[in-house]
Image (cartoon, grey):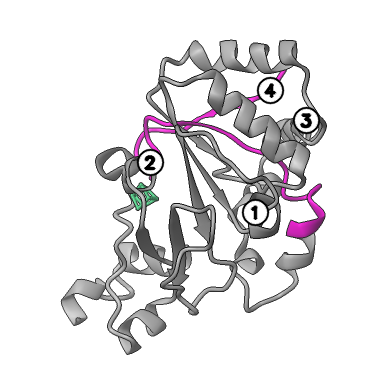
Amino acid sequence: MIHITEHKHGLKMTGFISINTSVLKNPYCSTNRCDNKKICSVCYGKYMSDRYPNLKKVLNSNYDILNKDLTIPEIDQIKKQLNRYNKRYIRLHSIGEISSIEMLSNYYEIVESLPGSIFALWSKRSDIVQSIHYKPDNLKLVYSNPYYDRPLNTIPEMFDSVFNVVTYGYAIKHKIKPNCNNQCIDCLKCYDQSGNIITELIKADQTRIKKGTFKPIEVIL
Ligand code: SF4
């Protein structure tokens, strides 16, 4: 059975549920974590998996389930599980990355089985996404820029939006005000709209602002 994450109160995804997979089992993630120019080098999913063994276990299990072609009864089982939460908005991969065409096509079948919900999937794998020439109408695909401090202003084919991450220093230098408001339920840009170029401040610098070490960017720009 797939594990569904319910996001805790007070965090960015309060009120959301998501389906997530292991970043430790995914070869793409393992390779990219070693490149310190890439956002994967500060992977939140790895940090959480190392810290919480039970989370690691369920993410491993989800990875194994979703990485092979699912049967119609298996898709139906996941649909029933998701339906119990009765959510309008569902995120795919707040932790994890698609690893194969099989995983992406499983997600497409899950999404299509719940036409009353809107899903958003974050991915860096334009190669996999562009190898399938359609996507469900109730799915937004957000291209997660692999590089921090190299914001993209064009949206790759098949995607609806781009998600950039910048450091505090880069944002100040280039006069960028991040437009991810860090409370998805009040924003929903990534779920309800297309054509967005979204920029988020890297998490470590968000923490520095919260602690008062750095001034809020709006105060400086
Ligand atoms: S832009 Fe809005 S919907 Fe997208 S991740 Fe940020 S807060 Fe969530």
> For the magenta stretch, what is the residue range?
1-29
- Across and down, in percent, residue 208 comes to 38, 69
Tell me which numbered mark, 4 or 2, is placed earlier along the sequence: 4
Residue 93 higher or lower than 8, as above or below: below
Residue 87 higher or lower than 175, as above or below: above
| The stretch drawn in magenta includes residue 12 | yes
Q: Which residue, as the protein is rendered here, is positioned at the far left? A: 219
Residue 8 higher or lower than 157, as above or below: above
Q: Which residue is drawn at 75% across and 47% down?
A: 99
Residue 180 higher or lower than 97, as above or below: below
Depth-wise, is mark 1 or mark 4 nearer the camera?
A: 1
**Are there few (<14), some (14-19), or many (20+) residues within 10 Å of tag 1?**
some
Is the shortest distance between ligand 1 and the CB of mark 4 under 8 Å? no
Q: Label 4 sits on what residue type?
A: Ile
Tell me which numbered mark, 3 or 1, is placed earlier along the sequence: 3
Is the shortest distance between ligand 1 and the CB of mark 2 under 8 Å? yes
Query: Picture quarter containing residue 154?
Result: bottom left
Q: Which mark is residue 61?
A: 3
Q: Are marks 1 and 4 in contact (CB under 8 Å)?
A: no
Which of these two is toward me, 12 or 85?
85
Tell me which numbered mark, 1 or 4, is placed earlier along the sequence: 4
Depth-wise, is mark 2 or mark 3 nearer the camera?
A: 2
Tell me which numbered mark, 4 or 3, is placed earlier along the sequence: 4
Depth-wise, is mark 3 or mark 1 nearer the camera?
A: 1
Query: Picture quarter containing residue 2?
Result: top right
Q: Which mark is residue 2?
A: 4
Q: Residue at x 70, y 51 (%)?
A: 131
SS type, badge 3: helix
